[in-house]
Every structure is written in structure tokens, then in C-alpha cells.
Amino acid sequence: MAQKVALITAGTAGLGAQIARVLAPDFRLVGNIVLSIQSTSDHDLQELDQAVNFANNRARGQALIEELHKIPSTSGSEQSPRFELLQADVGDRPSVKQLVEDTITKFGRLDVVVSNAGWTRVTNFNNLDEGMEDEDWDKCFLYNVKSHLWLMHAAKTHLESSEGAFITTASIAGVKPSGSSLPYSVTKAAAIHLSKALAIICSPKIRVNSVSPGLLLTDWGLSFGPEKIEKATKATKLQRLATVEVSETYTLAFLSIMDADNCARMSPIKFVCSQRQSR
């Protein structure tokens, strides 16, 4: 039996890398190195390409691939390649299409897509003047909404063939007005609604899910600074924030992608499961 294949965008660090670790025993994986999507400081947007260093992403991705190869496979007959890094800018539609085509060329099939890429520039959510930058709105809409749409469109035929799953990473900021910036919060809400729409459009062959985590203590989350992290911590019932390395919730969440009925037990985070939403 052919081993199933998963494509994870922004899959070399943080939540994306942890999803890869969770899926590694059961899937052949394609990790996408995204050229430039995250700005974690108040740097001018023109400096974004320099802020995200491609060489570091490549090295980080190779280190993850080496780590994944140490995880035993549950498949009786291991197929090659088991893991692969592919470079793409998910904010560019032809690049997204090429990413999917390269995945099919190398692996022959596609069963799961985790559309995990996103973008923000950290500002004061409560300051309307700081939420009025057109470039922030354009870039947030590009990476937080359109990139998911483009990826689904490129992968749709292949996911229909495998009756697979498509998962977007949204944010609690898209559920409750909050987060790193006003454009980020609004476009994450749009991403959730897009997932609901895609669940209807792409049923019954493809399951569409959306996960809305809160602030995770990844390298990106830590860049928010002590004040924002403390505020986010105090806003939680448990008075603590999650790390992807120890969060059983996220492990269960991404294992549940092969069984939509399991979504009902994932109470700490929000899902869009076809036409129903669990809380």
C-alpha cells in the first residue's frame, strides 16, 4: 500500500515543524521553506526580505529533515523519498501551483495539505492609527487568506483523488478581536470563513479543517516581548501559554485530520469540520 503524503507550508520551524514531527511516523512529508512571510518586529515592510534570511531557513529545514529521519516509520515498506524540502513563496500564485506540482512529481500523490503560512507586523491592536497601514492590510490578506485559497485550488484535484484533508492555521485573533495587529485579526477571521466556504465547495471528497491557536511560545511568539506575553498569559484561564513541543492538544489535532468525527473532542481549540464547528 502506498504511504500517504502530507504537504506542510512554513514547515521548518515552530508549529509547522511540530506538525511534521507528529505526522512523520505515518506520512511521507513535504516541508515548504517559505521565502519571506513573517515580520516579527516593527521594521519597515521594505526590509522584510532581509529580515527573513533564506539561508537560515534552508539550514533550519535541513536540520529538521535530519531529525525526522530519526523518527521510525510505521510503514512496513518505506518508500523514497520519505521527506523533502521544497522552496516556494506562498504569496505568489504561480509559486504555489509549482509547489504542488513538484510534490506530485516527487511523491506521486497528495493526501493532506497543512496550509500553515501566515504574516503579521506587530503593532498596538487598540491604536487605530497603527492599524491604518495599507501595506499591512495587503500583505496580511495575501498571506493569511489568498495563500490558502491558492493552495486549495492547486491541490484540489489531487486531494479529491485521495479523498484527503486540507487544514488551515488561523488564530484565536480571528475568533475574538485581538492579536498582533488589526489587519492580522481581521484577515484571520477571513481565513476561518474561507475554510468554512471551502468545506462546502470541496465536499464530499475533501475534508476542510481550520485550527485557531492562541499565542504559542515559539521563536515567533517570544518576539512579541515580555509585556504582550504577560498580557496574553493573564488572559488565559490556566494562566499559562502553550508550547508546540509539549502541547498534546496540537498533537491530537493533527492526528484527527484523518477522522473528522474526532474534532468534537478538541475543546481547547476551534475547528471548522465540514459544515459544523466544535467549541
Image: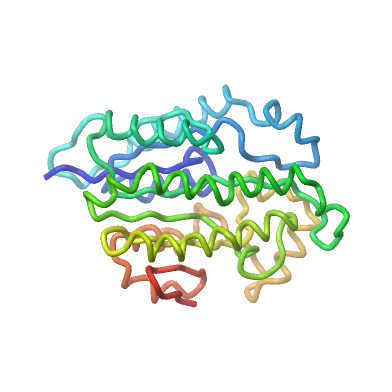
Decide if residue 78 is on the left or right side of residue 12: left
Q: On the image, which quarter does residue 182 sit in? A: bottom right
Decide if residue 257 is on the left or right side of residue 224: left
Q: Is residue 115 above or below residue 211?
A: above
Decide if residue 213 is on the left or right side of residue 239: left
Q: Is residue 215 above or below residue 267?
A: above
At a point 68% along the width and 60% down the height, the residue shown is 185
What sort of colour scheme is used for the picture?
rainbow
Q: Nearer the viewer, residue 46 or 173?
A: 46
Q: Position of residue 42 (x, y in %)?
A: 80, 41
Q: Is residue 75 above or below residue 47?
A: below
Q: Nearer the viewer, residue 153 or 57?
A: 153
Q: On the image, which quarter does residue 272 sit in? A: bottom left
Residue positioned most to the top: 55
At a point 46% along the width and 66% down the height, the residue shown is 196
At a point 38% along the width and 54% down the height, the residue shown is 166
Quarter of the image with the N terminus in it? top left
Q: Position of residue 174 (x, y in %)?
A: 62, 64
Decide if residue 256 is on the left or right side of residue 170: left
The count of marks equals 0
At a point 49% along the width and 36% down the height, the residue shown is 93
Q: Position of residue 62 (x, y in %)?
A: 45, 27
Q: Position of residue 232 (x, y in %)?
A: 72, 64
